[in-house]
Image (cartoon, rainbow, N blue to C red):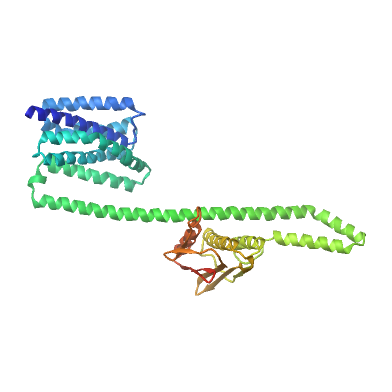
């Protein structure tokens, strides 16, 4: 029986080595298909070294020398041969070591039902090796691989936690047996370590989540601002092109009018002049606001409303916009007016459609009120209108982000066929 136990113990060590090396390489983004030769040679030479050490020095010495015999050389291999970041190299090896823990626990758990037989423990650990490795490669490695794109703070966190566990594991179970003989002091220390680690992870996770949400909001603003800038450029380009055409054709217009007058045909000349004036009015940007960018956005949507036969009332008495970024103002007004325009376009009959924009200053605050008629039911979630249509709903998020950026307040209301957006910032 002792010989059988030694055989299975040696086989188990071979499976531990296989699991650790393969898991570490995959966690470092070194796949088997692209590096078959490296896998074979690494497993062979590390296996030979482990076997010789086991036969010459014994299992106990091998276990204590494992960091210097396997772990540190494996980190050096990943760092020097595959040119991975040193932090990534260490994280991949330490994480692979941590992931060996469930494998060991499974063997201990199964052996518990067989009077803690070490042979059963080794056999169970061997059996679970391949399924656990597949789970690690498929579900864990993709996330560890992404660490190379993360900040130094994130890398430090993922490095320190497995490193501390690694040091404690070897200190309390390999080089000493304090975990089993240290009593309450060691047990309380391990409990404290787990609690502190949990709170550190929680705080950092919340911090990273907050930064991510902030970045996403800023990205929404930038995307919306870029879209509105394209619309502004397109409108200016169209206006300038039309003006250039009229300047170029001015001589022809004047000649035609002169010809009408020479032929004593004033009605046709008057009609032609009226047509030119109408076209010029349609191509001009009406001034609603002292701020050029805001005026351009409002004018653009006023023109769209006119084309769609939607009455639009505009009153902008506010004059102080210097404390706001132009991209934020354009994003706010453009999204609000676009939503209002979209709601009116869905209405039938058309006679009930309208949009109202009012912007004024009160107690040094910029106050905005946009009202429009609607027909389709408005769905709210936490007092925020939502849309289940694809590519819709981002505009509302962008509007909220702008108002919150300037520590303002906002509100969305819908009743009796009228939708209102109000903001003060």
Question: What percent of the width, then of the height, locates residue 126?
Answer: 19, 33
Which residue is depicted at the point 15% across and 34% down?
122
Question: What percent of the width, then of the height, locates residue 205?
Answer: 32, 53
Q: Nearer the viewer, residue 202 or 356?
A: 356
Quadrant of residue 147 in the image? top left
Q: Taking 39 as reference, is 238 left or right?
A: right
Q: Taking 65 as reference, is 332 left or right?
A: right
Quadrant of residue 334 in the image? bottom right
- Reply above or below: 275 against 119: below
Residue furthest to the right in view is 263
Q: Nearer the viewer, residue 281 or 416?
A: 416
What is the total number of numbered labels drawn onto the structure image?
0
Q: Taking 266 as reference, is 219 left or right?
A: left
Q: Nearer the viewer, residue 3 or 245?
A: 3
Q: Look at the image and tell me whether residue 64 can be seen.
A: no
- Reply above or below: 233 against 295: above
Residue furthest to the front in view is 349
Which residue is depicted at the point 13% across and 41% down?
173
Which residue is depicted at the point 59% across and 71% down?
317
Q: Dividing the image into 4 quarters, which one contains the N terminus? A: top left
- Reply above or below: 177 against 214: above
Question: What percent of the width, then of the height, locates residue 274?
Answer: 79, 63
Quadrant of residue 311 in the image? bottom right
Question: What percent of the width, then of the height, locates residue 215?
Answer: 42, 53
Q: Look at the image and tell me whether residue 42 can be seen.
A: yes
């Amino acid at each position: 029986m002792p010989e059988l136990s030694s055989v299975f113990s040696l086989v188990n060590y071979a499976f531990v080595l296989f699991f650790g090396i393969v898991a570490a390489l995959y966690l470092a983004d070194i796949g088997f298909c692209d590096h078959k030769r490296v896998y074979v040679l690494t497993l062979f030479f590390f296996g030979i070294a482990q076997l010789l050490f086991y036969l010459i020095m014994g299992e106990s010495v091998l276990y204590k020398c494992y960091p210097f015999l396997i772990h540190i050389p494996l980190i050096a291999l990943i760092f020097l041969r595959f040119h991975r970041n040193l932090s990534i190299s260490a994280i991949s090896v330490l994480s692979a070591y941590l992931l060996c823990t469930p494998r060991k626990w499974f063997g201990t758990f199964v052996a518990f039902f067989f009077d803690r037989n070490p042979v059963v423990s080794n056999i169970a650990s061997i059996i679970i090796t391949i399924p656990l490795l597949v789970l690690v490669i498929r579900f864990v490695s993709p996330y560890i691989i992404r660490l190379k794109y993360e900040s130094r703070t994130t890398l430090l966190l993922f490095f320190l936690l497995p490193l501390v566990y690694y040091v404690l594991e070897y200190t309390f179970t390999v080089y000493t047996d304090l975990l089993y003989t240290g009593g309450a002091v060691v047990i309380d220390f391990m409990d404290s370590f787990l609690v502190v680690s949990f709170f550190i992870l929680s705080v950092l996770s919340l911090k990273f989540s907050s930064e991510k949400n902030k970045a996403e909001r800023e990205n929404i603003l930038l995307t919306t601002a870029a879209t509105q800038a394209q619309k502004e450029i397109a409108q200016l380009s169209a206006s300038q092109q039309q003006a250039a055409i009229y300047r170029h054709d001015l001589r022809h217009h004047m000649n035609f009018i002169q010809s009408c007058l020479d032929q004593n045909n004033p009605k046709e000349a008057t009609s032609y002049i009226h047509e030119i004036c109408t076209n010029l009015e349609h191509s001009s940007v009406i001034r609603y606001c002292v701020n050029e960018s805001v005026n351009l956005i409002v004018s653009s949507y006023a023109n769209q409303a006119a084309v769609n036969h939607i009455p639009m009332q505009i009153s902008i008495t506010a004059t102080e916009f210097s404390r706001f970024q132009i991209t934020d103002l354009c994003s706010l007004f453009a999204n609000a007016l676009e939503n209002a325009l979209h709601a009116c376009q869905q209405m039938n009959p058309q006679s009930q459609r309208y949009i109202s924009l009012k912007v004024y200053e009160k107690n040094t605050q910029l106050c905005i009120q946009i009202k429009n008629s609607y027909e389709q039911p408005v769905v709210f979630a936490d007092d925020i209108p939502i849309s289940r249509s694809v590519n819709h709903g981002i505009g509302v998020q962008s509007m909220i982000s702008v108002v919150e950026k300037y520590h303002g307040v906002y509100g969305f209301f819908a009743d009796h066929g009228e939708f209102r957006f109000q903001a003060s910032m």
